Image: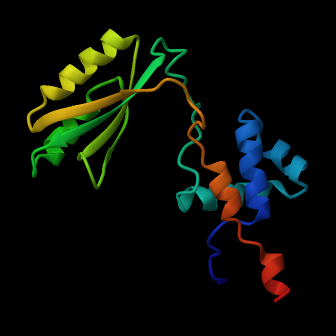
Amino acid sequence: MPARRRGLDPLDLRLLRLLRERPRSGLLEFARLLGVARGTVQARLDRMGDDGVITDFGPNLSHAALGHPVQAFTTLEVEQGSRELISRALEAIPELLEAHIVTGPGDVWCRIAGRDHEHVQRVIDGMLRIDGVRRSTTVIVLSTVVPHRVEPLARASVFDSAALTQR
């Protein structure tokens, strides 16, 4: 059995771009556009899923279109040893878009969405009521310069098998 290849190659990148640009297209359409067999497309999607490169196939939702146009980043300072309890409490907050344990100032960085500034304040007040949360610092997002993205990183990490064979 041949060794399993790791990383992305140019065909993987082209497939990922098509998935992003045409999420409703099927495997046969991707195969036609890429000039490969349907089985090749399926195998590559399966491999990238198994490797954790593709994390889901669901639609991306807009918090603004869902009525929550205001975004804020909140840093929580928490008591040591309370991370698990705080994590469970944070998961229950629907306005919490993501949370990360970090190094440096603060302990947990959160991105939240609200209907307006007052709503954001109520969400933060609720976070401060969680046992183990000592204080918070918040900044409001005025505009997004670069939205969340991973494709440029994927392009930069493409494994070029042709370049290796020329060495």
Q: Nearer the viewer, residue 60 or 119?
A: 119
Q: Locate residue 117, reporting x and y percent.
A: 36, 13
* Res 138 → quadrant: top left
Q: Residue at x 21, y 38 (%)?
A: 88
Does 30 appear above or below 7?
above
Location of the C terminus (image quadrant) = bottom right
Q: Is residue 8 above or below residue 73?
A: below
**Horizontal and vertical percent for residue 96?**
34, 29
- What is the quadrant of residue 28 in the picture? top right
Q: Residue at x 27, y 20 (%)?
A: 123
Residue 142 horizontal/vertical position (percent): 49, 23
Residue 128, position in %: x, y? 16, 27
Which colour assignment does the render follow?
A: rainbow
Tell me the residue at 60%/38% (across/down): 146
On screen, residue 112 versus residue 82, left or right, reads right
Determine whether, in the image, residue 47 is placed left or right of residue 18.
left
Q: Nearer the viewer, residue 139 or 26?
A: 139
Q: Please tell me which residue lies in front, 34 or 86.
A: 86
Quarter of the rendering occupied by the N terminus: bottom right
Q: Tell how many labels.
A: 0
Quarter of image, res 43: bottom right
Q: Is residue 47 left or right of residue 64?
A: right
Residue 114, compared with residue 19, is above or below; it is: above
Q: Residue furthest bottom?
A: 167
In the rendered structure, the answer to whether residue 99 lies left or right of residue 27 reads: left
